């Protein structure tokens, strides 16, 4: 197993080594020691490898990830898994602002809480937060699913498009054009599948969640809605 000690090597050297990997590489399991909150660790991975980061990371860890499974044994700074395309990123602590921002695919799991703007402008990523999320989460979210086992802050789903939000706890307030919706059987199956992918089979009940999405009143400009844009 390749081991990279960031107390000795630079993040640039690590990322270059990961970018040189080919899809048929035999180096499929990596360990990264002493991340010490450094930024941009594991950005742009494009191969199906397993990466364990042993500590806290800074901004944009695992951004633009494709295929890789990244486990962060600590907290993550702003923009973890930003613009992820596929694969899995698992934060075993808390996440700062804009977790999973603009993500197009894959699964982001956060064991703790996520700060403001979690899932901002998400475009197909699935995000599961076992704790609570901050204000303006799922702002302008276009596709994908945001599942929250705790509470949600102010202006949840402001200006949301076709993403879906499931919250088990309390919602402080909804943003513009975001409404609670009844869950269909297909929605319930989708939520159960997401909980299962995060290893929560039986640990969280689908019936305990409420679902939110777009009222579709802001898709086209109307002067009566000018104050909401």
Image (spheres, grey):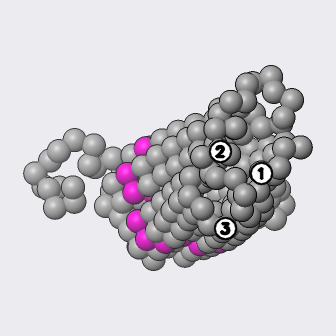
**216 to the left or right of 163:** left
| Residue 3 in picture, x, y percent from top left | 83, 49
Residue 144 visible: no
Instruction: Please report whichever mark, 2 or 1, sits nearer to the chain's N-terminal start.
Output: 1
Q: Residue furthest left?
A: 223
Task: Using the rendered view, name the quadrant where residue 72 is placed.
Answer: bottom right
Dot placed on the residue nearer the N-terminal end, 3 or 1: 1
Secondary-structure class at tag 2: helix
Judging by the rendered image, the residue that carries numbered circle 2 is 13
Do the residues under discs 2 and 1 have CB atoms within 8 angstroms? yes
Picture quarter with the C terminus: bottom left
Where is residue 181? Give x, y as percent: 49, 56
Residue at position x 27%, y 43% in the image: 219
For label 3, the crowd category at 10 Å Cα-Cα, with few meaning under 14, some 14 to 19 and many 20 or more, is few
As rendered, which of 185 and 152 lies closer to the eye? Answer: 152
Provide the residue designation for mark 1: 4
Residue 202 visible in the displayed image: yes
User: What is the total number of numbered labels drawn onto the structure image?
Assistant: 3
Mark 2 surroundings within 10 Å by alpha-carbon count, few (fewer than 14), some (14 through 19), many (20 or more): few
Q: Give how far across and how far down residue 37 sits, in percent.
A: 62, 66
Rounded to the nearest whole Å, what is the CA distance between mark 2 and mark 3?
Answer: 16 Å
Report the span colored magenta: 131-143
Asked if 40 appears above or below 150 in the picture, the reply is above
Which residue is identified by label 3?
Answer: 36
Q: Residue at point 70% right, 38% down?
A: 17
């Amino acid at each position: 197993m390749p081991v990279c000690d960031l107390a000795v090597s630079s993040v640039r050297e690590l990322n270059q080594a990961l970018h040189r990997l080919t899809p048929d590489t035999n180096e499929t399991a990596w360990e990264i020691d002493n991340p010490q909150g450094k930024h941009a660790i594991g950005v742009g991975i494009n191969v199906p490898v397993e990466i364990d980061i042993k500590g806290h990371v800074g901004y944009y860890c695992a951004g633009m990830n494709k295929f890789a499974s990244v486990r962060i044994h600590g907290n993550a700074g702003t923009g973890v898994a930003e613009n992820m395309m596929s694969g899995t990123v698992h934060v075993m602590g808390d996440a700062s602002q804009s977790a999973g921002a603009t993500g197009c695919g894959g699964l982001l799991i956060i064991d703790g809480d996520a700060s403001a703007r979690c899932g901002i402008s998400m475009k197909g990523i699935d995000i599961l937060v076992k704790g609570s999320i901050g204000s303006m989460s799922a702002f302008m979210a276009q596709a994908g699913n945001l599942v929250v086992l705790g509470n949600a802050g102010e202006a949840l789903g402001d200006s949301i498009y076709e993403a879906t939000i499931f919250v088990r706890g309390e919602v402080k307030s909804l943003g513009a054009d975001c409404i609670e919706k009844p869950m269909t059987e297909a929605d319930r199956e989708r939520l159960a599948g997401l909980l299962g992918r995060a290893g929560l089979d039986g640990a969280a009940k689908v019936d305990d969640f409420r679902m939110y999405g777009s009222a579709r009143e802001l898709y086209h400009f109307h002067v009566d809605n000018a104050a909401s844009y």
